[in-house]
Image (spheres, rainbow, N blue to C red):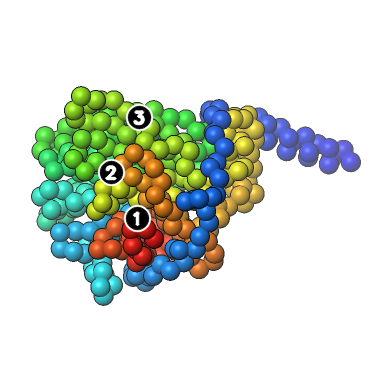
Amino acid sequence: MRIVALLLLAIAAYLLFWPIAITPQAWTPPPAPAAQGVLAPNQKLAAVETLAVQAGAGGEAVAFGPDGRLYTGFVDGRLVAIQPDTGAVEELANTGGRPLGLAFAPDGSLLIADAVHGLLALRAEGLVTLLDSVDGLKLGFADDLAVDSQGVVYLSDASHRFGHHEVTADFFEHAPNGRLIAYELGRGQARVLLDDLYFANGVALGPHEDYVLVNETARYRVRKLWLRGPRAGEDEILVDNLPGFPDNIRRSPRDTYWVALYGPRSEQLDALLPRPFLRSVVWRLPEALQPEPPHVARVLEIDAEGKILRSLQASGEGVYAPVTCAVEHQDQLWLGSLSARGIGRYRLPGQGG
């Protein structure tokens, strides 16, 4: 019995006092919105077709190029172009890191937010590193980007403390480790537009490039920063208390926005967020004992005022999930995923669908 008691004491001491790499911060989230009305459960994304399954896994973001092909980057660092009608794949380069956000510059070069190497460009001469630090602080987790007609890149740095293999650590710490950065391609200059963001993620520009949106994944919301006009420099919350973790955001041809939700809100995480000490204890548990996110696909369409217009969902073993990016092109949604194989394609049933 003495050995058992000592063992239990050692386990308790470990769970309570063992040094950890995170410093949890307290935050009390609002109750998750009810799953009713536009947010009522549905299985619409069960109809997703998967393209280029054999090409690779983890095409987290997708972008259409000037040549009409679909571009993405896989978990093994490869950048590829996919012919949307045939599924034919061409390998373009390998960043040696983790390519996430993609966008095309005005000169036609492919810009890449690479979680390991920062802001990259794929040009005729090959891959070029454009930016790996700002104000003396290294880009810890370049996540997504958007580029305007003048060649200004808006780049999210999800966390300057934790890299792409440490996402859970950033969420458990729940501190404002993220930034939104502007980088001028022509001048090679960068500046921080917003800091103290809670996991800065998807980025999208307004239709007139007078504002930029950035998702704060860990706060379930979308921030809006005015770039021009009488409110230039002001920021506000476009939409708050989303029913899941907003990942990438893309503007539609109707000037609405598709917000991909990595997964639904976790009741366990929401209950732990106001309790930093308890979060520290849970963090010390073996990873196998920590809850796995459910296999769910979800995309929201919101308007320019942040109103949720529709919710496309699906759950189940064979569903293309998690969805981390949704790009509307020719009445179809092209879906990316942080871990699923290939690229998803969903035929939109119409503006009321």
Query: In the rendered structure, are the residues bearing label 2 and label 3 in contact, judged by CB atoms less than 8 Å apart?
Result: no
Q: Nearer the viewer, mark 2 or mark 3?
A: 3
Q: Residue at horizontal 49%, vertical 63%?
A: 43
Q: Is residue 39 above or below residue 275?
A: below
Left or right: 232 as drawn, with respect to 114: left
Q: Which residue is mark 2?
A: 204
Q: Which residue is mark 1?
A: 326
Q: Which residue is mark 3?
A: 236
Q: Residue at horizontal 39%, vertical 60%?
A: 353
**Front in this rendered view, residue 304 or 131:** 304
SS category of the residue bearing label 1? strand
Q: Is residue 64 above or below residue 244?
A: below
Give the CA separation, mark 3 to mark 1.
24 Å
**Count of labels in the image:** 3
Query: Which amino acid, mark 2?
Result: Ala
Query: In the rendered structure, are the residues bearing label 1 and label 2 in contact, judged by CB atoms less than 8 Å apart?
Result: no
Q: Is residue 6 visible?
A: yes
